[in-house]
Amino acid sequence: MRVEFVKLRFKATKSEDMGDSTTTDTCRVVDSTKVWTTLITNTAYLSGLLTLDFALKQHDSRYPLIALYTDSFPEEGHKALDIRNIPKKHVKYLVPSAQKDFSKDPRFYDCWSKLTPFSLTEYERVVQLDSDMLVLENMDELMDVHLDPPEMHGEGDRVFAACHACVCNPMGRPHYPSNWVPENCAYTIQHQTPDKAQVYGASSSTRLGIPNGGLQVVNPSKTVYDKIVAHLSSPSTMEYDFADQSLLSDLFKGRWVGLPYIYNALKTLRDVHRPIWREERVKNIHYILSPKPFDEEETDKAMPETHRWWWQVNSERLRKEKKVGINDGF
């Protein structure tokens, strides 16, 4: 399947210091000026990261994946990356000066650091991916989506690109905002035009206009990153229910590019937005919420079908690694 992209125009500790508005250095760790990145703070998501890297290579991406690690990432994790020749870069652990209590969703404590790619000015283009994703087809075209150049300092209307968050709250979580209902979801309005939903994303101003932070397409800019860091010091962060994606939707409201769901196909969309879901068109599935495929056993008969897709790729990775002497349990 090929999408003509012209149609688009295209867990760590909370005690680590946020530091200043720059990462450790601005030296490239790979030759390419366009890269995929993924955040890793501990080994809980490491199998996901390794399988993500394997899948990108399996589908012949021309661009490398860089693991962005924080101080909390342990030595055994470093060894796992090094033995597989996965490039890595140290980044600061970002936290706001004051933040909402995420005890009901602890994953959000780490999510602020997913804003780091905006600071990686040594690269022309960064596409941030969550480690609980599985690439199903080549999606290198994301490296060429039309975005505002850094010289616009985040004042344009194409600051970054992302897929919409699904705000249907299908699990009925009581601590989610009361306006997270199907009628406010950007994907709901696409039910009547499912063919277009495969190639067009809803406008960023549609309904609640909240991006999902799992995939972010960015032209790094020091000015934009400085604005983000300054916003992390605002009391408004206490009101953000979804950390990084709440900040982005607030700071750049209606000024980001909505991508079609196929690039960040939240696993819940398969049921909640079945009118637009077409498995043969999905390029990248995102295993939001728990459990993750790598938290389950491959032999679990109750495992959702979409989780079996991950296990098929992961098992292939493990077989190939074993042939070259890599058998470290990850």
Image: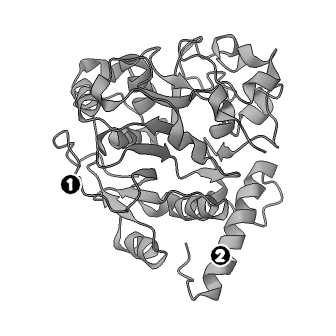
Q: Amino acid at mark 2?
A: Leu
Q: Which of 129/125 is in front? A: 125
Q: Nearer the viewer, residue 246 or 65?
A: 65
Mark identifier at residue 25: 1
Relative to 236, 276 lies left or right:
right
Instruction: Give the quarter of the image for residue 59.
Output: bottom right
Left or right of 309 on screen, residue 23 = left
Q: Residues within 10 Å of mark 2 (few under 14, many from 20)?
A: some
User: Which image quadrant: the N terminus?
Assistant: top right
Cα–Cα span, label 2 and label 1: 33 Å
Kind of element beneath mark 1: loop
Visible residue check, residue 141: yes
Tell me the element at label 2. Answer: helix
The residue under label 2 is 318
The three-letter amino acid code for the residue at tag 1 is: Asp
Q: Residue at x 35, y 48 (%)?
A: 123
Q: Quadrant of the C terminus?
A: bottom right
Residue 197 quadrant: top right
Can see residue 98?
A: no
Indicate the colouring scheme. one colour
Q: Residue at x 53, y 34 (%)?
A: 145
Residue 189 placed where, x, y %?
Answer: 72, 13
Between disc 2 and disc 1, whose residue precedes?
Answer: 1
